[in-house]
Image (cartoon, helix red, strand yellow):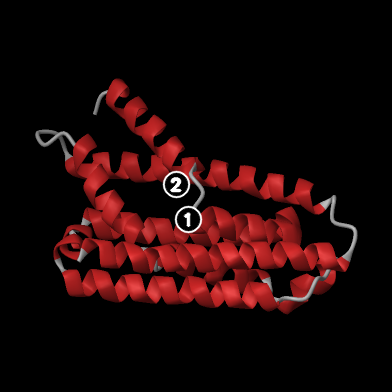
Amino acid sequence: MTIEWWLTYLVTTIILSLSPGSGAINTMSTGISYGFRGALPSIAGLQVGLLIHIVLVGIGLGTLLTQSMLAFDILKWLGAGYLIWLGIQQWRTAGALDLKAVSKALPGSGLFKRAILVNLTNPKSIVFLAALFPQFIIPHQPQGIQYLILGATSIVVDIIVMIGYATLATHVAKWIKEPHQMRLLNRIFGSLFILVGTLLLFARRANT
């Protein structure tokens, strides 16, 4: 893999990571409710989910998923259902401003596991990786190291972008002075989770 080829992939990955999706929404929501430190387990969980997708693509299961309509639909329904459920939970969350009190409601391990599921149950992510990676793999060169480079690049870029989203969220949180403002933000992010989950369902119908 040449440096020019890698730079092209790097730019592509940056653009994709910056585009708002379920991971970005989850990071922003967690950053506002739990603070920057509280968002770190969530960011780590997103990367674990991404890593699992990368491994699945590397061993060929990503291609299998793109070819199996049943497997794709099952994962899509699970992902959409989970995001919608998260949205409902977020919508119903009270407007708490004490980050220490809020952190007791869902510890770091809970935020970590939740983020893993957010990424892991997103079929569009693994299908996209399965379609994107081969475009940057040079057939006559060792493929293992190329997958490692592309995967590591994706994870590092996503970590940096998610840290940026978490930092932005903490700055937004500083302007929140009243419980009703926090309640409004919870409902905004809850609605975004529900919207993303619903869009997954409509994308499924559009592909059938």
If the image is split into quadrants, where does the N terminus sit?
Answer: top left
The answer for how far apart the CA atoms under marks 2 and 1 are is: 6 Å
In this rendered view, identify the residue nearer to me: 79 or 152: 79
Look at the image and tell me whether residue 98 can be seen: no
Q: Is residue 114 above or below residue 175?
A: below
The residue sitting at the right extreme is 177
- Answer with mark 2 or mark 1, whichever residue precedes in sequence: 1
Residue at 70% across / 45% down in the picture? 167
Q: Amino acid at mark 1?
A: Gln
Task: Point out residue 117 in the picture as x, y percentages from the top left corner.
Answer: 46, 70
Look at the image and tell me whether residue 61 can be seen: yes
Q: In the drawing, what numbered circle is on residue 47?
A: 1
Q: Secondary structure at mark 1?
A: helix
Task: Point out residue 140 in the picture as x, y percentages from the top left corner.
Answer: 9, 33
If the image is split into quadrants, where does the C terminus sit?
Answer: bottom left
The residue that label 2 is drawn on is: 155
Task: Point out residue 91 in the picture as x, y percentages from the top left corner.
Answer: 66, 73
Mark 2–mark 1 contact, CB under 8 Å?
yes
Q: On the picture, is 43 further left or further right than 52?
A: right
Q: Secondary structure at mark 2?
A: helix
Residue at 51% across / 49% down in the picture? 20
Residue at 79% across / 53% down in the picture? 173
